[in-house]
Image (spheres, grey):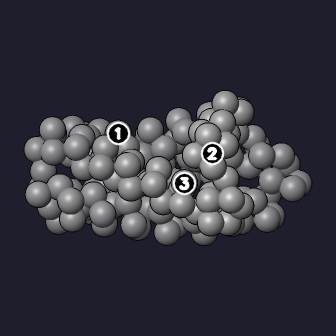
Amino acid sequence: MILKPALVYFAVVFAAAFAFGALRVTLIAPRSGALAAGTLEVPLILGLSWLVAGRVLRRWPLSQGQALAMGGLAFVFLMLAEFALAYLLSGQSPGAYAATFATAPGALGLAGQVGFALIPALRRQVSG
């Protein structure tokens, strides 16, 4: 019941975040630094996540628990996709990828990813 909405939520937000990330890395971070660039990007992606979650939940009405599970599954998809990209684009091992979360920009990104996971349940709670 939650697989399809989780995949749609993940795919739409991931595609947009990939585009935003490319802009962040190539245009913003070299001028402002990684943390400032992430500080600009994370609220935009979370706002988009809120909008996408609303559309997904209208298409697939889920209970509060199902919406939480949907966000959790989308988070798993997100982390797998991000690790795959880190490995394919820069050869990062799982340990090296996990170590990025110990930096300020990495911790900010991880907080945004956790927010992404929680948004479907929050959106469901607000929408009723």
Q: Residue 90: x, y in percent?
A: 71, 61
| Residue 119 in view in this figure | no
What label does residue 118 carry, if any?
1
Where residue 61 sits: x, y (%)? Answer: 12, 56
Judging by the rendered image, the residue that carries numbered circle 3 is 83
Is disc 1 surrounded by few (<14), some (14 to 19) or many (20+) residues within 10 Å?
many
Look at the picture and state if 12 lies above or below 86.
below
Cβ–Cβ under 8 Å for marks 3 and 2: yes
Q: Is residue 75 left or right of residue 68?
A: right
User: What residue is disc 2 on?
Assistant: 97
Q: Quadrant of residue 91?
A: bottom right
Q: Secondary structure at mark 1?
A: helix
On the image, which quarter does residue 66 sit in? Answer: top left
Q: Quadrant of the N terminus?
A: bottom left
Q: Which residue type carries mark 3?
A: Phe
Q: Residue at x 35, y 39 (%)?
A: 118
Dot 3 or dot 1: first in sequence order is: 3
**How many numbered marks are there?**
3
Dot 2 or dot 1: first in sequence order is 2
> Does residue 84 appear in the picture of this structure?
yes
Few, some or many residues within 10 Å of mark 3 (<14, 14–19, 20+): some
Determine the secondary structure under disc 3: helix
- Say whether marks 2 and 1 touch (CB < 8 Å): no
> Where does the C terminus fall, quadrant-wise?
top left
Which residue is depicted at the point 44% across and 38% down? 114
